[in-house]
Amino acid sequence: MVEPEDLIQYGMIPEFSGRIPVVATLNELSRDDLVRILVEPRNALVRQYEKLFGLENVKLKFQDDAVQAIASSAYDKDTGARGLRAIIEEVMLDLMFDIPSRSEVKECVITPGVISKKEEPLIVYEHASSDSEQGGRSSASA
């Protein structure tokens, strides 16, 4: 039989006590729900990081299994959707500082091992055009 005034008198702020009467039931998020949160919204975490790397002219690609690994990690730690960002940041932090200083990097692929085993991501390097021309000549002359 608690009223909002009772909570204010107890020391709660009015903004909080005004929301108490609102009752919402929530279901626990599944792994599939967490995967959808990572990839589906317009401002999804995966898209945010792809955009950040795109600013450096590097294509960032998360393998499907890697997205599953991120979701599984958050699910296992019972951190829910809020834990997804922390998991991705832990993996991407060093890359975000390292990649911009390396102009030859063309693509970065995040694999499940990067998430679960702390492996290095796959880095695709851009070859100089003179190297590809020489490669073309040698294969043509062979």
Image (spheres, rainbow, N blue to C red):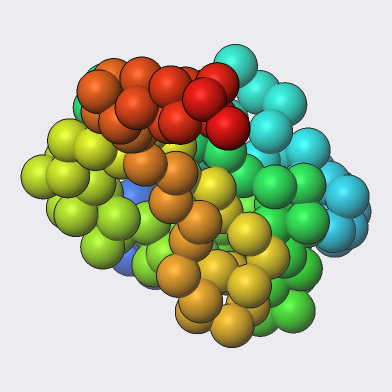
> Can residue 82 be spotted in the picture?
no
Q: Up-down: is 7 above or below 20? A: below
* Residue 133 lies in quadrant: top left
* Residue beneath the point at 58% across and 69% down: 115
Q: Residue at x 68, y 65 (%)?
A: 112
Please determine whether, in this image, residue 105 is positioned above or below residue 1: above
Answer with the quarter of the image where residue 95 lies.
Answer: bottom left
Question: Whole-percent x and y of residue 71?
Answer: 72, 60
Viewer-proximal residue among 7 and 140: 140
Q: Quarter of the image containing the C terminus?
A: top right
Q: On the rendered structure, is 48 left or right of 24? A: left
Q: Nearer the viewer, residue 137 or 64?
A: 137
Taking 3 as reference, is 96 left or right? left
Residue drawn at (42%, 64%), measured in percent from left and top? 91
| Relative depth, front residue between 18 and 86 | 86
Is 64 left, or right, of 106 in this rendering? right
Disc count in the image? 0
| Viewer-side residue, 77 vs 119 | 119
Q: Is residue 3 above or below residue 46?
A: below
Q: Is residue 107 visible?
A: yes
Residue 59: x and y, percent?
45, 29
Q: Viewed as shown, does residue 11 lie left or right of 135? A: left
Residue 82 picture location, percent across and down: 54, 55
Residue 81 % position (x, y): 63, 53
- The quadrant of the image that shows the N terminus is bottom right
